Image (cartoon, helix red, strand yellow):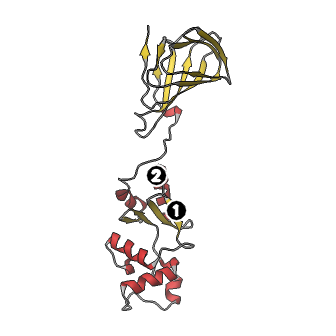
Amino acid sequence: MADLKIYHNPDCSKSRATLQLIQERGLPVNIINYLKNPPTAAEIYGMCQGLSVRPTDIIRSKENKFDSLGLSIDHQLTDEEWCQIMFNNPVLIERPLVVNGDQVALGRPPEQVLEILGECQPVTTLTDMDKQASLDFDWGAIKWLCNSQIDSQAQMTFGIVHINPGESNPIHYHPNCEELIYVISGQCEHSLSSEVHQLKAGMMLRIPQGVKHNATNNGQEPVSMVICYSSADRQTVFIE
């Protein structure tokens, strides 16, 4: 379970905006609907300590429930008693509260939680091919969507290659990884040492680690292929 958690009310715009900030960063977060699963009085007290505030600073005193209970901020109640009241009546808990280990932030405004997210590591990579730089060559182009330079946590390399009609990419091999090729459109002839394979759209070819290979587009249109490697730090040795 994620160390990062948000006490969330899906009907609250501030809570939704705070959750969106966290999710846009690809961070694993435990989403707790506190109206259905409220934090204990002890947990509320701990969050107050993390915020360096009194429980009365995070109680929603303008809620109708606050008045119906006959409460007043001026009541001489202990911190523990206020926390118990919020546990018994979770609608009175200010939202959203975000907890990251022993750090706590209140998402009002939502950007306020960013200061406690520095230690969190994203678990996902999201890239858009239209926004990635194209590496252009005489024979075609490559766009990388995932590798160790794009995401330091990645364990694979993934990209899209295009080879122009009548062109070939240089003969090469990868000393540290195998490669998978999937043809999206077009056709090509792929040479692997002594083997030659004719590939068309919908076909996949696995190229073992260390095997020399290259592709020649023998069709009338560009051939587009997905290329995937078993290492995020793909290494290439060119033969010519």
Q: Is residue 62 visible?
A: no
- Tell which of 100 and 180 is nearer to you: 180
Front-most of 142 and 102?
102
Which image quadrant for residue 180?
A: top right
For label 1, count other residues whose C-alpha is less than 10 Å away and answer few (under 14), some (14-19) or many (20+).
some
Instruction: Locate the C terminus by quadrant.
Output: top left
Q: Position of residue 134 (x, y in %)?
A: 47, 25
In this picture, residue 137 sits left or right of residue 117: right
Mark 2 burial class by Cα count in 10 Å: few <14, some 14-19, many 20+? some
Q: CA distance from mark 2 to mark 1?
A: 12 Å
Q: Which residue is mark 1?
A: 31
Please name the residue shown 54% across and 22% down the image: 161
Identify the amino acid type marked 2.
Leu
Answer with left or right where residue 52 lies relative to residue 198: left
Q: Quadrant of residue 107?
A: bottom left
Circle 2 residue: 27
Q: Is residue 14 above or below residue 195?
A: below
| SS under mark 2 | loop
Q: Residue at x 54, y 72 (%)?
A: 37
In percent of width and height, residue 73 lies at 39, 86
Q: Is residue 85 visible?
A: yes
In terms of depth relative to the viewer, which is nearer, 229 or 144?
229
Residue 47's tag is: none
| Residue displayed at 45% across by 73% down | 94
Label 1: element kind: strand
At which x and y percent is residue 117? 38, 55
**Looking at the picture, which amino acid does disc 1 mark?**
Ile
Locate residue 104, reporting x and y percent: 37, 66
Reply above or below: 100 against 92: above
